[in-house]
Amino acid sequence: MIIGKPYKQKFLSNWRQWLKVTLHGYNYGNIMANELAGLYHYDEKSVSHLRSKYLKHGIKDFLIALLFKQTKNHFDNELINADAQNTQTIHFLMEDDGRDDYKRQCRFVLDQLSDYRVKVYTVNKFGKGAKQFNVASFLSKCRLLLNIARAVKLSNAFEHDTRKKNLFVLTKCLHYHDILTYVEQNKLLVDAKLLIVFADMKECGSMMVQAARKLNIKTATLQHAIYLKRKDNEFSHSVINYLNSQADYVLGWGESVLPVYQDNVANPRQQVLLSGTSDATYSIDKFYQQENDVKADHGCFSVFFSGQTLRMSNMKMLAIAEEVANKKGFKYKVLMHPSNKPEDYSFDQCTGLAEALKGSAHISMLINSSDFCICHNTTVYFTVMLKHKPCFRFKDEVFVDYGGLDDIFSDGEGLLKKVNSVSGDKQIEKIEQILIRHFGESGFSYKQSIRQILADAV
């Protein structure tokens, strides 16, 4: 897994070339940023006997994508609030990762748009449609490939499995070409006054924002996690959250996001409207609810993993959890990130492990049943704060400090010292200010921000 400065050099040098690839008014560097950002974490040697197998499949998929145009329905849509008195129509593109926490964020914002007619789009990943040869589509795709060949040095784009990865990327481009054709030919956005997307830095969000821009439609993207500018040693996939943001407006959470978008060279027109968190879990009002004052005397603690790009950090944290559990006579539970793969972790060898779970629905239960929690780079740290429970953060060479309390450790001894020194002082005021800075004040709302955008659009 490549991360930090080596990752920055690999990803940025290649992505800058891709940003020169355009066709029919669309920038494929913006569309492909998420795909490329993921690949460069894994630009390492793969298992040699699998390469030829994957290469054959890659060639087949590439030729099918080049020769045939996909005719399936790429987006399902539903009109909600059809009887709203305000006749302005807002278009809203849902998340496409299938994550329950992301779906909740989308629904939270949609609930605040009840005054408007809203056309909600869901990416149709699994729908089937006919593939047919189309001369105009074929020639257009050939032109796209030619533009890529002129702008991108494909021969040295990757250090390992270059042909396989290039075929994957090129095939994706041809697929996105079909989606863009579908959006334009079906005039999906023709009646939109405003387009809101869950994530404009990802493929479908980028395509829809660019399509709206061609029609002079205002665009906005949600903030879906805590964003911080990354230093060289922290550089990872998540930098595209701000480096590849293309919408006119960012519907941000709290003040901590403002410095991230200052002097956005890629999109100097972009404005940040503070709207509060889109995840009700992090509402500052919850901090004062008595039900969150959970007692601690369970002989158990919880470990919250970070995303798959931080697999090595998760493994180190797991080893520390095992050490501390054995020394204190505790058991511990693990909550995996949605992107984690259980087979990457030797859970069967962990004698102190009570349970390994996956899914955000388990978060509250784990916090409530724990004496304390440990984590690395994850927003769950603040969820634990809301529950008035101690949470300690593991610091390694790729740790990102979101700002918090004196709760950082680097090894088992350090964690034991933190755990043993926990006092009854919950530092209420300091925690309150941290939460407000990241998640916004109680007076912030999406309804207010949307009203401002539509007024600007007049």
Image (cartoon, rainbow, N blue to C red):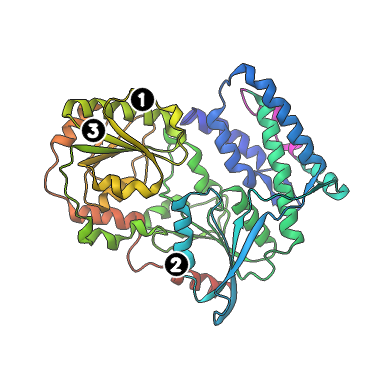
**Which mark, residue 331?**
3
Q: Amino acid at mark 1?
A: Asp
Q: Position of residue 248 (x, y in %)?
A: 56, 61
SS at circle 3: strand
Q: Position of residue 319 (x, y in %)?
A: 31, 25
Cα gap from disc 3 to disc 1, whole angstroms: 14 Å
Magenta span includes 149: yes
SS at circle 2: helix
Q: What residue sits right under mark 1 in the picture?
A: 348
For the point 56% across and 23% down, the residue is 44
Cα gap from disc 2 to disc 3, whole angstroms: 42 Å
Residue 76 visible in image: yes
For the point 62% across and 39% down, the residue is 16
**Residue range of the region highlighted in magenta in the rendering:** 148-160
**Residue 182's quadrant in the figure?**
bottom right
Task: Between residue 94 and residue 404, name the one nearer to us.
Answer: 94
